[in-house]
């Protein structure tokens, strides 16, 4: 019996309708619908709408770096104090290979998963798009950086401007940047163009690592990897890494206790520390840890009355 062409036509139409409906649903989803974390320090990551600030346009007083360089690094001033995994920094090292490192430079060009390893120097790392990028060849440009904003609300922007992939046969380029924010200590990745034309194996995050890590993050759980070797970073995309806030919001004293309203690592155990002499006596943990809610809020009760104390929420 010959197949009925009308049945085949109906099947194709139904499949096409289903695909169209799926595309409509996906297009309606906000980037903020995608989130991961927290890691063991408390960082959260969320997809955001791209807000790319081009440092190459006339009038932007950016500084050009790493021109005609392959596997190169340079240490630059941040322009303010930036806290990353509990340590304050005023400088950061930029690599041609799409990473920032703290406390040293790293020229490692072979990306690995942050859940199992890291750059060979085992440094604190921010990786908007870790890959074997180069500014060495014709058609590429260089990197740029610029600190802008007013004191207390500044941001450092580092832009990788049209690097080429050393591991690709294509000479097409990409364009992306990272932003570090004063005060909040948040981090943002913004991707204008992540497609290497003619090479899907090097495009949109494929062949790259995207995320952040602390020293030995693969063993202490202080890493938050958005992707590894996966085509999940489209053009015109953004990611925000939100730093936890460790603070005492309020304190209420009673006859035999002190109740503290605190913020710390979301959904993680947090410790309150205290000292009787903020200048001469080190802070020490009090009692047991308290697990914060999803927003990082928690209540701690100090049941050891008497001596005056200075309190703080300790880093995990």
Image: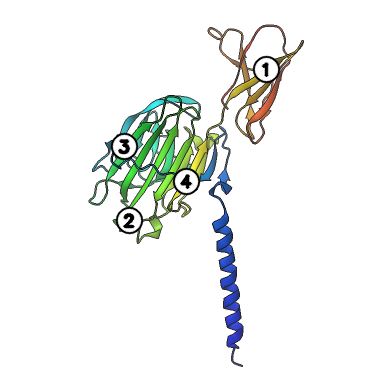
Residue drawn at point x = 45 percent, y = 45 percent? 210
Q: Residues within 10 Å of mark 3 (few under 14, many from 20)?
A: few
Percent x, y for residue 71? 30, 42
Q: What secondary structure is marked by label 2?
A: loop
The alpha-carbon separation of the residues under discs 2 and 3 comes to 32 Å
Say how many tags the image has. Answer: 4
The alpha-carbon separation of the residues under discs 4 and 3 comes to 22 Å
The alpha-carbon separation of the residues under discs 4 and 1 comes to 38 Å
Q: Residues within 10 Å of mark 4 (few under 14, many from 20)?
A: many
Looking at the image, the residue that sits furthest to the front is 59
Percent x, y for residue 74? 30, 33
In the figure, 92 relative to 230: above or below?
above
Instruction: Give the residue at mark 1.
Output: 251
Percent x, y for residue 316? 58, 27
Instruction: Give the residue at mark 2.
Output: 168
The alpha-carbon separation of the residues under discs 2 and 1 comes to 58 Å
Residue 76: mark in rendering: none
User: Quadrant of residue 299 in the image?
Assistant: top right
Q: Residues within 10 Å of mark 1 (few under 14, many from 20)?
A: some
**2 vs 1, front mark:** 1
Compared across the picture, whether 132 is left or right of 313 comes to left
Instruction: Give the residue at mark 4.
Output: 238
Instruction: Give the residue at mark 3.
Output: 60
**4 vs 3, front mark:** 3
In the figure, 46 relative to 17: above or below?
above
């Amino acid at each position: 019996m010959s197949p009925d062409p009308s049945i085949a036509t109906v099947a194709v139409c139904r499949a096409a309708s289903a695909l169209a409906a799926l595309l409509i649903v996906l297009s309606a989803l906000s980037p903020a619908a995608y989130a991961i974390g927290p890691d063991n320090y408390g960082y959260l990551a969320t997809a955001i709408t791209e807000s790319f600030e081009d440092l190459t346009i006339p009038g932007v007083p950016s500084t050009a770096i790493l021109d005609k360089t392959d596997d190169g690094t340079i240490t630059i001033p941040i322009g303010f104090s930036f806290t990353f995994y509990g340590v304050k920094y005023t400088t950061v090292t930029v690599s041609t290979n799409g990473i920032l490192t703290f406390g040293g430079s790293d020229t490692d060009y072979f990306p690995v998963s942050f859940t199992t390893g890291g750059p060979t120097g085992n440094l604190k790392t921010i990786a908007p798009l870790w890959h074997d990028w180069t500014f060495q060849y014709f058609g590429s440009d260089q990197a740029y950086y610029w600190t802008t904003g007013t004191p207390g609300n500044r941001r450092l922007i580092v832009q990788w401007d049209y690097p080429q992939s050393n591991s690709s046969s294509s000479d097409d380029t990409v364009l992306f940047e990272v932003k570090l924010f004063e005060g909040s200590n948040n981090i943002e990745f913004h991707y204008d163009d992540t497609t290497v034309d003619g090479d899907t194996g090097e495009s949109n995050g494929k062949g790259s690592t995207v995320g952040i890590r602390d020293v030995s993050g693969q063993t202490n759980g202080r890493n938050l990897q958005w992707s590894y070797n996966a085509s999940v970073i489209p053009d015109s995309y953004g990611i925000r890494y939100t730093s936890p806030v460790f603070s005492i919001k309020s304190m209420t004293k009673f006859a035999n206790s002190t109740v503290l309203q605190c913020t710390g690592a979301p959904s993680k155990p947090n410790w309150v520390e205290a000292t009787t002499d903020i200048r001469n006596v080190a802070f020490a943990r009090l009692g047991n840890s308290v697990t914060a809610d999803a927003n990082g809020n928690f209540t701690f009760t100090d049941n050891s009355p008497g001596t005056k104390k200075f309190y703080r929420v300790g880093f995990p």
